[in-house]
């Protein structure tokens, strides 16, 4: 990996950490929520699928952006904020769907995830 790409990746990582801190805790953003669980099946052409699970409690940051697992992907990832917001707005307990990586790398080797989100209300 060249220095320019490494610098871009470090900038992206720092920006995501700042956004995460700025998001605030789940309890402040969604006071009626007691837990959020996200199950994601990460799919990439030529690679075995990977299951990832993220659990959010009231003390967790209300930040629902997940990095792409492709090591060459600099500015990609999966933002499930809109999914969580719509679920809570409509007081839905479950949602599922797919999202493609948001990266701008011209490679056709981008990934996608199949997600299942469960929200438990207080």
Image: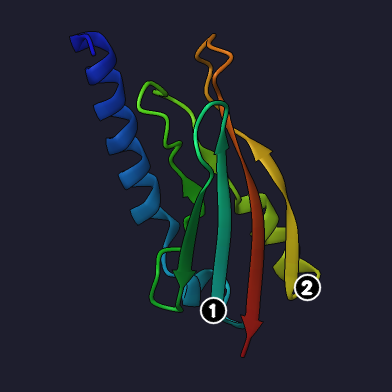
Extreme residue toward the bottom, this view? 122
> Closest to the observer: 49 or 4?
49
Mark 1 to mark 2 CA distance (whole Å): 13 Å
3 shown above or below 47: above
* Side (left or right) of 91 relative to 27: right
Q: Number of numbered discs present?
A: 2
Q: Which residue is mark 1?
A: 35
Image location of residue 33, percent across then percent down: 59, 80
Looking at the image, which residue sits at the far left?
A: 3
Q: Label for residue 92?
A: 2
Crowdedness near tag 2: few (<14), some (14–19) or many (≥20) residues, C-alpha within 10 Å:
some
Q: Secondary structure at mark 2?
A: loop
- Identify which residue is drawn at 23% across, 19% down: 6
Looking at the picture, does residue 114 appear above or below residue 8?
Answer: below
Structural crowding at the residue carrying mark 1, measured as other residues with C-alpha within 10 Å and reported as few (<14), some (14–19) or many (≥20): some
**N-terminal of the two: label 1 or label 2?**
1
Residue at 63% across, 82% down: 120
Q: Residue at x 65, y 64 (%)?
A: 117
Disc sitting over residue 24 in the figure: none
Q: Position of residue 84 (x, y in %)?
A: 65, 61
Indicate the quadrant containing the N terminus: top left, top right, bottom left or bottom right: top left
* Image position of 30 with respect to 107: above or below: below
In-image side of 112 versus 50 (left or right):
right
Q: Is residue 109 left or right of residue 92?
A: left
Q: Quadrant of residue 38?
A: bottom right
Q: Secondary structure at mark 1?
A: strand
């Amino acid at each position: 990996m060249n220095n320019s790409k490494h610098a871009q990746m470090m900038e992206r990582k720092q920006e995501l950490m700042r956004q995460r801190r700025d998001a605030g805790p789940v309890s402040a953003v969604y006071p009626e929520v007691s837990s959020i669980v996200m199950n994601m099946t990460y799919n990439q052409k030529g690679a075995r699928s990977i299951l990832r699970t993220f659990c959010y409690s009231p003390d967790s940051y209300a930040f629902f952006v997940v990095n792409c697992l492709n090591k060459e992907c600099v500015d990609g990832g999966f933002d499930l904020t809109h999914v969580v917001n719509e679920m809570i707005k409509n007081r839905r307990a479950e949602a599922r769907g797919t999202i493609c990586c948001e990266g701008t790398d011209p490679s056709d080797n981008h990934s996608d995830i199949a997600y299942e989100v469960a929200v438990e209300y207080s």
